[in-house]
Amino acid sequence: MDYLHKLLSFSSLYSVPAFLGALALSAALFVLGFGLLHRMSSTVKKWVTIACTFIAGLYFLLGFIVPTNDKGENFITPTVEPVSYFIMYVFAWTLGLGIISLTIVHGRRLLTRHAGWHHSLAFFIAMLSFILFGFWSQIGASGPAGVKSAYSALFTLLINLDAAMFSLLAFYIASAAYRAFRVRTVEAGLLMVAALLVMLGLVNVGVWLTSWIPESSTWAFFRLENLSVWMMSIINMSGQRAVTIGVAVGALAMAMRLWLSLERGAFFSQEG
Amino acid sequence: MANVAPDTTVARNDRESPVVVTVLLGCLAAFIILSLLFAGKAAAQDHWTRVLSVVATLGIFTILYRENPLFRFLEHIFIGLATGFGVVYLWLKVMEPRWYIPMMPASLVEGGEGKWWLFFALLFGLLFFSVYFPKLSWMNRFAIGIIMGWAAGYALRAFVGLIGPQITAAFKAPITKYYVEGLPALNSIPMTIGETTWWWHPYWLISLIVLMCVLAYFFFSVEHRAGWIRKPAVAGRYLLMLSLGTIFGTTVMARLSLLIARFDIVIDNIRDWGVMILGKM
């Protein structure tokens, strides 16, 4: 009875047999519940899913709406953080989906010796060696020296490849800039002027160009470095704030549609 | 006949000779073996790190000339390493300390707390993988539904808790009783009316005008025909362009900074190796 009470009250279990029993019981109940649901009609599955989606959203909303005590807490507040973390742990397993997809794509190419199979082999070697050395280097207080060295080299390679990939964007952004800066409309002209002001304000040449304006004079505002800061802190901030407000209102409407499962195509709609 | 784009990847890969393939795979194997051998040799490891930096940078930059086997090879290695990093980081930094260790009892894992109910996270997580079994794939939608419901509830909370205060903060009064500093210049101008000193904040007024105009541009509940909405909306479009131009400028500068850093690494290392080999440059 004490064990059952502990299970029902979600108390910690410290003995190994009790813990393993709890896991086995949880798994059995989970499989049984979903097994029963699997035998139900598509309509039942759809409504169970919709109900669970609604409850998951309502839980967080109630935590915000229900009146709080002097400490700013209600009956939901203490559980909000653990439940949020729990959902994040659930979500973390989706990384496995990405790995399986990559494994299927590259595995198929490797097994069929499709053109470029050696790239897939390189992908597997890189991924598996990083995982192997990553976990192996954590074993014990210091970990095997050779493994640590290999892990460090792989990590260095990753960082450098990452930085090099992103620095390539500097070249591509140059062609984007050419297209954006072709002044054909007033809007394109304004975009160019703003970008030029900001870029010049951030480099020494820009600062030098207007360095003849004394820093303490009334006209110091027109020094490029000041103008650039002003553009970023006044015009850009307000513009972005307006966009953020618009996005937030859109996200609110979208959240309502998702929460109430009104979104077209959600949950089994193709199954009628 | 369906208009199908030719598979250029296959065409490109067909050109790669067995010699190129062998050399590339051999380099990868040599890289791992050398990395293992350099354990405990600080100087060798330092040189090795520099070589990797230069090879990775120049290898990736070869794409600027044209598509080539070296770039594609490094690209796949990058994807593999990034995936491996995702797995290692997620487990070691998130799942192990926050999920696995608290779930296990202390007698099995050091620091364990025996929170057995965390096991349900794995059970629910496994539902995602039902997508690979057509008959069970509805379970995947169940798991996604819970995540979506949570995200929707969180978004509703976030709107009130996070965005709400920002909206309030956006509407700053242009005239206050307080002196405000921190902006480039001329933000707070004193005005004495009677015995009270008021502070006039022109920048806050400009901010308010920009905000209202850009919001008017995105306000589609009313057709932009009447002057009272059309004029602010047009001004909003121009102001938004200034704002986007500012973002574009900072983005360009950020990318250039990355590029300069890569050039720095390559040039510095090559110069050092030159000094090492030739003595003086």
Image (cartoon, rainbow, N blue to C red):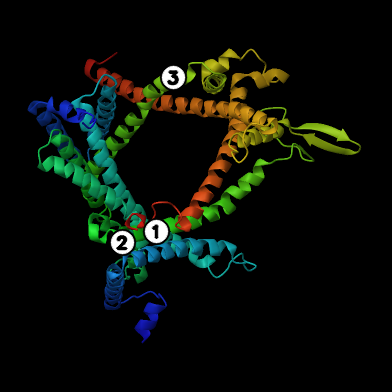
Q: Quadrant of residue B280?
A: top left
- Does any portion of residue A82 appear in the rendered image? no
Query: In this rendering, do the residues under marks 3 and 1 share a single chain?
Result: no
Q: SS of the residue at dot 1? A: helix
Asked if both marks, 2 and 3, belong to the same chain, the answer given is no
Mark 2 Cα shell of 10 Å, populated few (<14), some (14-19), many (≥20)? many
Amino acid, disc 3: Arg
Left or right: residue A127 versus residue A218 is: left
Q: Position of residue B162 (x, y in %)?
A: 57, 50
Numbered badge on residue A179: 3
Q: Which of A44 and B142 lies nearest the eye of the viewer?
A: A44
The residues bearing labels 1 and 2 have C-alpha atoms spaced at a distance of 10 Å
Dot 2 amino acid type: Met
Q: CA distance from mark 2 to mark 3?
A: 47 Å
Which callout, 1 or 2, points at the residue further toward the start of the chain? 2
Mark 3, residues whose alpha carbon is within 10 Å: few (<14), some, or many (≥20)? few
Q: Check the residue under mark 3 and report the chain it is in.
A: A
Q: Chain of mark 1?
A: B
Q: In which quadrant will I find the N terminus of chain A?
A: bottom left
The quadrant the C terminus of chain A occupies is bottom left
Q: Which mark is residue B139?
A: 2
Rendered location of residue A115, percent (x, y): 13, 33
Per the image, the residue denoted by label 1 is: B145
Nearest the camera: A253 or B120?
A: A253
**Is residue B140 placed above or below A6 in the rendered structure?**
above
> Is B41 drawn above or below residue A89 in the view shown?
above
Residue B269 seen in the figure = yes
* Left or right, B194 with reference to B80: right
- Which amino acid type is marked by label 1? Gly
What is the chain identity of the residue bearing mark 2?
A: B
Q: Residue B172's x, y, as percent?
A: 70, 40
Pick whichever, B20 or B241, lies toward us.
B241
